[in-house]
Amino acid sequence: MRQPLATALILAVALWLGAVGQARAEEPDFLTVGAGYYDLFDDQAAAEARFEYRFSEKNKLLWFTPFVGLTATSDAATYGYAGIALDVFFGNRWVATPTFAAGLYGNGDGKDLGHAIEFRSGLEVAYRFDDYSRVGLSFTHISNAGIGERNPGVESLVLFYSVPFDAVFGE
């Protein structure tokens, strides 16, 4: 029951912040890599690696930017997902980004989350450089929203770096 409440709260905050924050019109496609701590508040902690592709502002769905990603842990758990994000700028440098995604989870030797279909909600805070790249922290919660018999959920804290796609692969 935590997941619907957390999702509703994140979306409400995102909409409020979107109304008061300054939006930037020309954010590029991003490749994001991250590493951090998986299962932050439980006894099956593991290292986490995260890879995401964030679409540019040209591909927005209403106010939201779509993204796809893959998470893997040192316990061989994997999570492939697709979702939406909302960048909220505080000046030119700081960006808060609430996110929501749905995807498929395989527990490997790691934590059994109770279902193959899992939902992820989160909040990122990042510093934006002149070249549009970002460095920041991401806090996420993954759970199956009660569609499985078990729904233990998992939280992650990840340090990430986002680089414009064109800076890596050119145009």
Image (cartoon, grey):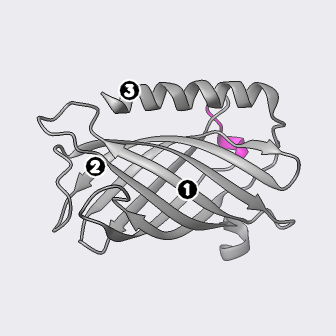
**Is 112 displayed left or right of 17 in the figure?**
left
Dot 3 or dot 1: first in sequence order is 3
Residue range in magenta is: 57-62
Image coords of residue 38 (percent x, y): 37, 63
Dot 2 or dot 1: first in sequence order is 2
Q: Residues within 10 Å of mark 1 (few under 14, many from 20)?
A: many
The residue beneath circle 1 is 138
The front one of 140 and 87 is: 140
Image coords of residue 169 (percent x, y): 66, 74
Residue type for callout 3: Pro
Q: Label 1: state its secondary structure.
A: strand
The residue beneath circle 2 is 104
* In this view, the mark in front (2 or 1): 1
Residue type for callout 1: Ser
Q: Residues within 10 Å of mark 3 (few under 14, many from 20)?
A: some
**Is 88 displayed left or right of 22 in the figure?**
left
Quadrant that contains the N terminus = top left
Residue occupying the point 21% across, 39% down: 151
Image coords of residue 112 (percent x, y): 17, 54
Q: Label 3: state its secondary structure.
A: helix
Q: Label 2: state its secondary structure.
A: strand
Task: Residue 4: give its label.
Answer: 3
Dot 2 or dot 3: first in sequence order is 3
